[in-house]
Amino acid sequence: MLDWAKTIQAKGEAGIQSLIGEVESFEIEFKEKTDSSTPALSKEDKKNIAKEVCGFANAAGGVIVFGVKTETNRNSHQDKVVEVRPITGLSNLLSAIRGVLETNVAPPIKDTELLSVPTDADPENGYVLICVPRSEDGPHMSVATKEHRYYRRTSENTVMMDHRMVRDMMLAPRDADLELSWLLRNRHSRGGSPEKTITADLCLSLVNNTFSTAFSPYILLETISSFSAKLTKDPDIKLHVLSERKYAFSCPRDLVLHPKIPFQFLWYELGASVQNEPFRACLSSELWQEAANPEIWKIGRASMSEPIVDHFKDGFELKVSFGAENALPKHKIVRYSKAQLCAKFVEIEIRKNIQDEALREHALGALRPFGVPQTQILQQIDVSF
């Protein structure tokens, strides 16, 4: 989120104004100062800052945008930015916020960054972005006036931690390490002329790469609208729709990731059609990389009844953040070119049709430069006509 905050800062006041209409999320909190005409912080300001900073530090980290007004949507109960409220005396405001971070948060949080955004009209006035990292020194307590409470960020709200949550956080190990795992799972295929159609699920999973159990995993995902995504049927996984393209998946603490076992969160339904004649010619000639030539493939939404529309001419991009209660968060941008997607479908055909183990491994090896994931083949339905 620090990169996001720096992007907003680089745009100046226009960056802050671009937030109008945005809603709070798991990693973003909007706050209005009680009196924007002075840099002095009221008791309520100090309480709000300490609460939100502790909440983010005790969860996955986040950014507080200070100097915007919000209103709560009656239906979704989400707070949305409706107006910018620049604060007078920006340099003094920064000093006051640093004082709150040092005296109203226990223990103090390391590496918290303050980014100032001056107004266009007067550089002495403006806004502050408080960038809070996830802390390994927690839990952190707000010790503002009449507070002395622990808070934690959940979905788009900051809630008070109960005794069990505080105890578990104090005792939780910090040595789990998670990574993303992509699995292409074949669904159906149908041979024909001039094109062969294949549908498959591109599954997103988390894998615990350590030998310590990971507790309460989560994923934040920003995707593109042309994807048709499905959530795993596990009733313990909760979906939070943060915006049209951004989702969060959270789990209770009794849901754990055991070492080395992929845990599937969601999958995307992909469909592909390939020109049968050149494709078969490549396979029969063992030209494995040529079989993944994007010119002979169309990849889009899964459909066996309608022609595949080539939605992914330029591939696709996902922004993914993930972690667990005892695993540091990671943030990744996943980019797949169309050629890589084509190679995944070629792998399906190789695993399905080549029985000779040595030849199959040779073919898969030829595709490795594309970054092809492990493929799980389920029951096949192959109708030739």
Image (cartoon, rainbow, N blue to C red):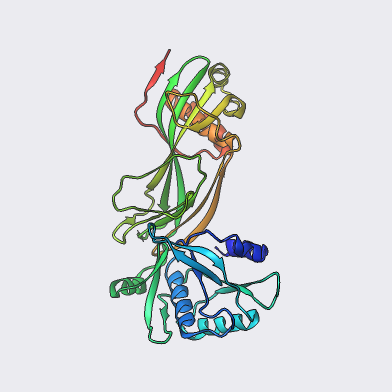
State whether residue 367 appears in this view: yes
Residue in front for this viewpoint, 302 or 346: 302
Q: Is residue 310 left or right of residue 385?
A: right
Q: Is residue 120 left or right of residue 81?
A: right
Q: Residue 145 at what x, y percent from top left?
A: 42, 87
The residue depicted at 34 percent of the width and 57 percent of the height is 251
Residue in front for this viewpoint, 326 or 139: 139
Q: Is residue 92 left or right of residue 300?
A: right
Q: Residue 379 at what x, y percent from top left?
A: 34, 28
> So how many labels did they put on this image?
0
Q: Residue 215 at what x, y percent from top left?
A: 35, 61
Report the quarter where the N terminus lies: bottom right
Q: Quadrant of residue 385?
A: top left
The residue depicted at 42 percent of the width and 15 percent of the height is 384
Q: Is residue 215 above or below residue 117?
A: above
Q: Is residue 383 left or right of residue 368?
A: left
Q: Residue 69 at what x, y percent from top left?
A: 52, 69
